[in-house]
Image: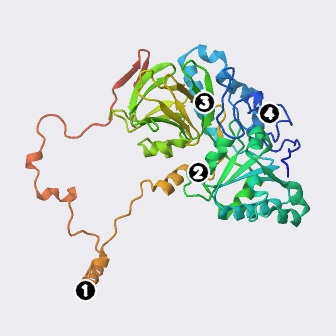
Amino acid sequence: MNPQSIPPRRVSGSIMANSHAASPSPIVSPTAARPIDTEASFSPHGTISPLTSSSPVSAPPMIHNKLYCEQARSKPKKASATLKLSDPELKTVRSHAELAQTANGVRMLAKNLTRATIQLDVRSIMIVTKAKDNSLVVLTRELVEWLLGQSRDIAVYVDKGLEKSKRFNAREIFESSEKAQRNLRFWDKQFAMRNPEIFDLVLTLGGDGTVLYVSNLFQRIVPPVISFALGSLGFLTNFQFEEFPKHMVKVLERGVRANLRMRFTCRVHHADGRLVSEQQVLNELVVDRGPSPYVTQLELYGDGSLLTVAQADGLIIATPTGSTAYSLSAGGSLVHPGVSAISVTPICPHTLSFRPILLPDGMVLKVRVPLTSRSTAWASFDGKERLELKRGDYVTIRASPYPFPTVISSKTEYIDSVSRNLHWNVRDSQKPFTHLLSAKNKQLFEGGHGDAQFDIDYSDENDDELGTADTEITGSEPSEVEYDDDRPCFAHPNAKITLDHQ
């Protein structure tokens, strides 16, 4: 069965249901709703292919059209305050107070993004199943049958490899009902890359690798992604498949809250500046020495200025999402996905003082292989494709205008995932060793267990037995520290601040 497009639909709730239903929101670039021509940048058989030098270096922020906020459209006055962030007036503010107020507004806006509920008029769902695991094929069939059994008409797209699968048995599903013949469809990589707007929601069945595949598949606009944990590792898969009916009913009826995870736009250039390829990265870019036995030498630039020259096995440039991956294994810090930062982690550096560092996400980084390097380097993108960087070649890294929206399962999903996968700060509580006692001594212990006093106590309450003659403080100064400090603190010649602890 050939992939089919979905007809335009009406606006539902507070989110625009289709890019053809109304004009784009004033806070989102109008180009977000246009069809994306990915053939110029990405090959149907791979995500990295030669580009022309005329390709744009940067693009305005874009998200999937299902994430347009209709509330901002209906209140243009509030939307204009958001537009001011890109207005030239921001560069010529009248006072530092106005700039501080704007900065605080940006923080509050970022905080409220995760609280917003996205009402989805779901008409088309894409299911991405973990590869090379036949046990998940049957689970995919079970999920498809449940979705097709719902009252509303939902087009369900599954991998084209299941069209002739005996385990999936698409023919039996088609024969079961007329609705299945109309709504069960198949997708392939080329179709998904060219038509990201068709899918209202993406369901992944697998682990973090399956989620990374979705990021690799949608190199531009990404539909909201809900991930069910059916893999070996799951920092990004926070939904249990056993409860998928409950979760899906909630998504279809109430909407979702999405975390717009930052991605990188990585662009590889030759020494003469010619553009070689471009890739959107969810986890990290790794530049390493590859098969060379020599320590690689890499120049790291930030906004055009040389930051350092790294002599190491390589460099890891990671997003907050990727901080729990390769970067963590190399000694990098955990970074909450809500933190706008770029993590730079060296791999086995020659200089031990070369520690991991967090840089602002507004900085444009460049990793260059010096002309004097003893060997070439290799760049990999989310552990997928690898490209050789010859002497003089470089990679630029910047925050991508195409975020990766993942459906939030709970307010504490990040800490829960870190605790679940890393056993973060897990420690057994102190327990009494009564199981080591003999029956006689155990009875003796239980007989006096109600006594609140300890036979051995090293607390300060017993220090009076030792005497305090040698520790007395002599002099006219008071022995107690005064914590009520009313001294003025001069932060500015015209500003006086008094510290008050009352």
Callout 2 secondary element? helix
> Mark 2 or mark 4, which is nearer the start of the sequence?
4
Q: CA distance from mark 1 to mark 2?
A: 55 Å
| Percent position of residue 422, x then y | 46, 54
**Category of crowding for the residue at label 1, using alpha-carbon neighbours closer than 10 angstroms: few (below 14), some (14–19), many (at least 20):** few
Using the rendered image of the protein, determine whether residue 345 is visible from the camera's viewpoint.
no
| Residue 59 picture location, percent across and down | 68, 26
Crowd tier of the residue under label 4, counting other residues whose Cα lies within 10 Å: few below 14, some 14–19, many 20 or above: few
Q: Which residue is mark 4?
A: 35
Looking at the rendered structure, the kind of residue marked 2 is Asp
Please state which of residues 345 and 260 is positioned toward the viewer in this rendering.
Answer: 345
Q: Amino acid at mark 1?
A: Lys
Percent across and percent down for residue 160 are 76, 52
Please say if the residues under marks 3 and 1 sit with CB atoms less than 8 Å apart: no
Q: From this viewpoint, which residue is outermost toward the right?
A: 178
Residue 412 rendering spot, x and y as whole percentages: 56, 51
2 or 3: tag closer to the N-terminus: 3
Q: Which residue is mark 1?
A: 440
Horizontal relation, residue 231 to residue 179: left or right:
left
Q: Which residue is identified by label 3?
A: 106
Give the mark nearer the N terminus: 1 vs 4. 4
Residue 61, visible in the rendered structure:
yes
User: Which residue bears the numbered disc 2?
Assistant: 208
Q: Residue at x 29, y 70 (%)?
A: 452
Q: Residue 33 occupies which quadrant of the picture?
A: top right
Distance, label 4 to label 3, CA atoms, is: 30 Å
